[in-house]
Amino acid sequence: MSGSRDQILGRIRRALAGAPHQAAPARGAVDRDYLRVHGRRDPAQTADLLAENLADYRAIVHRATGEELPGRLAGLLAARGARRIVVPPGLPEQWLSAVRNVERMADSAELTARDLDAFDSVVTGCAVAIAETGTIVLDAGPDQGRRRITLVPDHHVVVVRVPEQLVDSVPQALERLDPVRPLTWISGPSATSDIELDRVEGVHGPRTLEVVLVTD
């Protein structure tokens, strides 16, 4: 492989040997007159579109009010049979106030991937949710934690606050996100397909993704 590479690069060098060197032309402003949002929706319709697209990606979508959230999360963990869960250090305590008989561990740098594999579920918040693509974006904020905790456990429950964390489109999401932060873009549970198009879930992330849309 190295010999073939050297041969190809050598041919390229010889072909460019007599070519005059020119500085790259200056580029003007990038034309950004593309559509920022496809269609016009009110907040309720945007939430419905997010739910529809998440479900299309095989995520399980739930809705709750702020008061209902603790009970809803407790119910989801109980239905899953979760006995050990890991949570980001900054997850609001109130969210899990109704959870009983479950060992809860706050994430820390000492927890390795092997340690995290022993947890049944992870519960996090999010940075933003994109309706048009059915995408949840995490940025390692206090209620989201390290990327590792959302990739290793087999069951991820993520809370989206509607409407404040909900946008219509990717351009709107990018305006809210800090590009220097570690961003994780999630569209449904982890899945891949082989050459025969056999779908396998949970290969490089959680097998089950549950999203709770919380409205005040």
Image: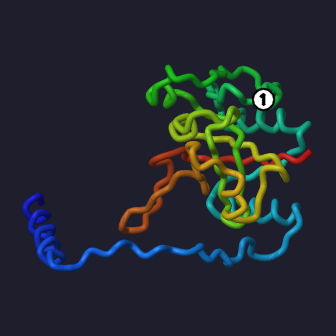
Q: Residues within 10 Å of mark 1 (few under 14, many from 20)?
A: some
Badge 1 marks a residue whose secondary structure is loop
Residue depicted at x 68% and y 32% = 142
**Observer-nearest residue: 2 or 151?**
2
Q: Give residue 10's quadrant in the image.
A: bottom left
Residue depicted at x 91% and y 36% = 67
Residue depicted at x 85% and y 66% = 45
Residue 140 point in image, percent of width and height: 62, 38
Q: Which residue lies under the disc numbered 1? A: 92
Residue 176 point in image, percent of width and height: 71, 52
**Observer-nearest residue: 5 or 167?**
5
Q: How many marks?
A: 1
**Callout 1 amino acid:** Pro
For the N terminus, give its image quadrant: bottom left
Q: Give residue 150's quadrant in the image.
A: top right
Residue 113 point in image, percent of width and height: 46, 30
Which colour style is shown? Answer: rainbow
